[in-house]
């Protein structure tokens, strides 16, 4: 049996080249010897301390907290010192800062001390029980984001207990090793990165967990959800991990290993060539301009994305500033960092576009004033919160317009999760009311198209807006009824589904008829082949993570608009994903 993965061919021969499918978490390709990483389970102290030992045990916990916090600070330094995607390294630092905040939490420390004092239990067991209660609360929270933080909490707990039990967190692995495990924590990934491991394979995990984010930031190929891989692969066995395709190959033949190594070398050559394109604008082979913009969420990312020369900011997320405070419920923004974030973003955009998305929470991003919901993805989120909390909507619009109206960038304000025309009209009225106070300001108003109802109503929405932006991540999951964070339905979540393309095509046609600008800011924009088809459908600009800009730019420059328009027509006639994939292969690529 033969199958293709990248430019190398996998042919099963006499029990060799065994293919194991998983989920691509961090891009990259590697071949090396496996290291089965299976930390032993904790053995907690069962003894009961005496009253005279309480103070001593509490001091041990304080000491362990201090040491683990110092370890975490060192891990952050190691992460910053690794080669990889500069844009994501700041996210890694933020994750480790979260670890430090947990370790400094006075309520956590007080509860551990109380367990030691009242139950006369040793420090390691007190730590375990307090963290177990915290983890159980996260498990029943109803929030995917909270559940995916559990490995971080487990990581902190394990390191505290290891310190209390005087165990060293040192793993002896060789450079280029492929780490195979059931599950892996962020700090472990950073320590493995220091050993220059070649790749990571895990049986469990989520695409939006901190472990996945850090693997991406450090440029380590990572494939997760590979069922039973720790029982299949033998210690020290040569294996291949493909973080592009989400596959692992055990017992590879020498022929396959050489093919994979050649593919790795070819990709490195392409990466260096792509760097030369940073100064060039996005356009097709015939000169049709397609601005390639960047998605931003954190101020720390701004300096790191400059080298990719984005042609503006196509999606500036603002919700990170709201999730920890109830003040925003009543529209109080003074004294917070978002104004500085807006100002620095405007400086980055220069005279190009800066699209600011309004407060988009709900689903797996819960504000402090929201209640737990049985199905948050279909609940109180996006524009629904903005319209129910009108002071919040008005004050954020006021802050954005007041902050940005004097900058030379082309400011655009975008409303998330629109589902009907009434929501558009209500938000437009609120926007127009705020704009009355800034008569000289030139700021556009637009909406996100993220659910099928909005796409189908695009012709009705167009007269009320200056632009639309398609969020393909949510549009895919709502169209296909497949939660993109649920591993049980990963196979159903596919942006290349014909229904998703048809909704995009319908929206593009409506925008063209009403002379309304259309952009795409979801993951599909970062897929070079799909991005090219989007341009053929009439999408005016694309926005993505900065490291994806060069590869998309390169593909666009190899294809004429006429060819892409013809390809788009064929795509819209497709009935299956496989038909779409066949057509995408016809697009010219490097």
Image (tube, helix red, strand yellow):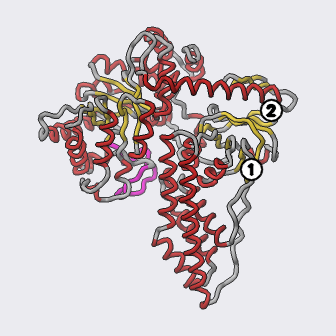
The stretch of residues the image draws in magenta is 365-383
Residue 541 position within the rendered picture, expressed as x and y whole percent measured from the top left: 38, 24
Q: Is residue 273 above or below residue 21?
A: above
Q: Decide whether residue 567 is among the magenta residues.
A: no
Quadrant for the C terminus, please: top right
Q: Is residue 486 above or below residue 152?
A: above
Q: Where does label 2 land, which residue?
A: 252
Q: Is residue 523 above or below residue 220?
A: above
Closest to the camera, between mark 1 and mark 2, is 1
Q: Decide whether residue 371 is among the magenta residues.
A: yes
Q: Secondary structure at mark 1?
A: loop
**Which of the two residues, 440 or 566, is positioned nearer the viewer here?**
440
Residue furthest bottom as drawn: 52
Judge left or right: residue 397 versus residue 583. Answer: left
Residue at 49% from the left image edge and 64% from the top image edge: 102
Q: Is residue 486 visible?
A: no
Q: Are marks 1 and 2 in contact (CB under 8 Å)?
A: no
């Amino acid at each position: 049996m033969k199958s293709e993965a990248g430019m190398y061919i996998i042919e099963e021969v006499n029990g060799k080249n065994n293919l194991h499918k998983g989920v691509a978490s961090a891009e990259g390709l590697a071949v090396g010897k496996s290291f089965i990483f299976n930390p032993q389970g904790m053995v907690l102290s069962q003894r009961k301390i005496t009253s005279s030992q309480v103070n001593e045990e509490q001091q041990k916990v304080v000491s362990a907290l201090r040491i683990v916090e110092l370890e975490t600070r060192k891990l952050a330094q190691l992460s910053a010192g690794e080669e990889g995607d500069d844009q994501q390294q700041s996210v890694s630092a933020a994750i480790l800062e979260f670890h430090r905040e947990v370790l400094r939490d006075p309520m956590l420390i007080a509860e551990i001390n109380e367990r030691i004092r009242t139950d006369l239990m040793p420090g390691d067991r007190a730590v375990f029980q307090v963290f177990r209660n915290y983890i159980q609360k996260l498990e029943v929270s109803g929030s995917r984001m909270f559940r995916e933080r559990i490995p971080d909490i487990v990581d902190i707990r394990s390191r505290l207990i290891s310190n209390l039990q005087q165990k060293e967190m040192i793993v002896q692995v060789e450079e280029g090793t492929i780490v195979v495990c059931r599950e892996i924590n962020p700090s472990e990934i950073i320590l493995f990165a220091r050993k220059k491991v070649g790749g990571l394979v895990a049986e469990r995990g989520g695409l939006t967990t901190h472990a996945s984010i850090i693997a991406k930031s450090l440029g380590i190929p990572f494939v997760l959800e590979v069922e039973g891989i720790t029982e299949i692969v033998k210690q020290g066995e040569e294996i291949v991990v493909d973080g592009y395709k989400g596959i692992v190959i055990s017992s590879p033949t020498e022929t396959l290993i050489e093919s994979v190594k050649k593919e790795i070398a070819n990709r490195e050559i392409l990466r260096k060539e792509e760097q030369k394109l940073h100064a060039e604008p996005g356009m097709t082979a015939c000169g049709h301009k397609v601005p390639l913009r960047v998605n931003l969420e954190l101020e720390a990312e701004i300096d790191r994305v400059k080298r990719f020369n984005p042609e503006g900011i196509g999606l500036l997320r603002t919700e990170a500033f709201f999730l920890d405070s109830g003040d925003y419920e009543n529209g109080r923004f003074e004294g917070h960092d978002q104004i500085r974030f807006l100002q620095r973003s405007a400086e980055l955009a220069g005279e190009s576009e800066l699209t600011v998305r309004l407060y988009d929470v709900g689903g797996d991003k819960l504000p402090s004033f929201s209640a737990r919901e049985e199905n948050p993805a279909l609940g109180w989120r996006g524009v629904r919160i903005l319209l129910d909390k009108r002071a919040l909507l008005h004050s954020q619009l006021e802050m954005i317009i007041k902050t940005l109206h004097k900058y030379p960038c082309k400011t655009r304000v975008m409303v998330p999760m629109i589902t009907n025309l009434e929501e558009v009209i209500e938000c437009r009225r609120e926007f127009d009311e705020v704009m009355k106070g800034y008569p000289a300001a030139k700021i556009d108003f637009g909406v996100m198209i993220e659910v099928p109802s909005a796409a189908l109503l695009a012709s009705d929405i167009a007269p009320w807006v200056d632009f639309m932006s398609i969020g393909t991540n949510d549009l895919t999951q709502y169209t296909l009824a497949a939660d993109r964070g649920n591993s049980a339905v990963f196979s159903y979540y596919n942006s290349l589904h014909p229904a998703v393309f048809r909704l995009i095509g319908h929206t593009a046609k409506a925008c063209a008829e009403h002379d309304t600008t259309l952009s795409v800011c979801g993951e599909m924009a970062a897929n070079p082949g799909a991005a090219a088809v989007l341009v053929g459908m009439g999408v005016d600009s694309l926005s993505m993570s900065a490291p994806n800009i060069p590869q998309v730019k390169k593909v666009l420059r190899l294809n004429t608009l006429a060819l892409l328009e013809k390809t788009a027509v064929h795509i819209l006639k497709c009935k299956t994903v496989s038909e779409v994939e066949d057509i995408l292969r016809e697009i010219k690529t490097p």
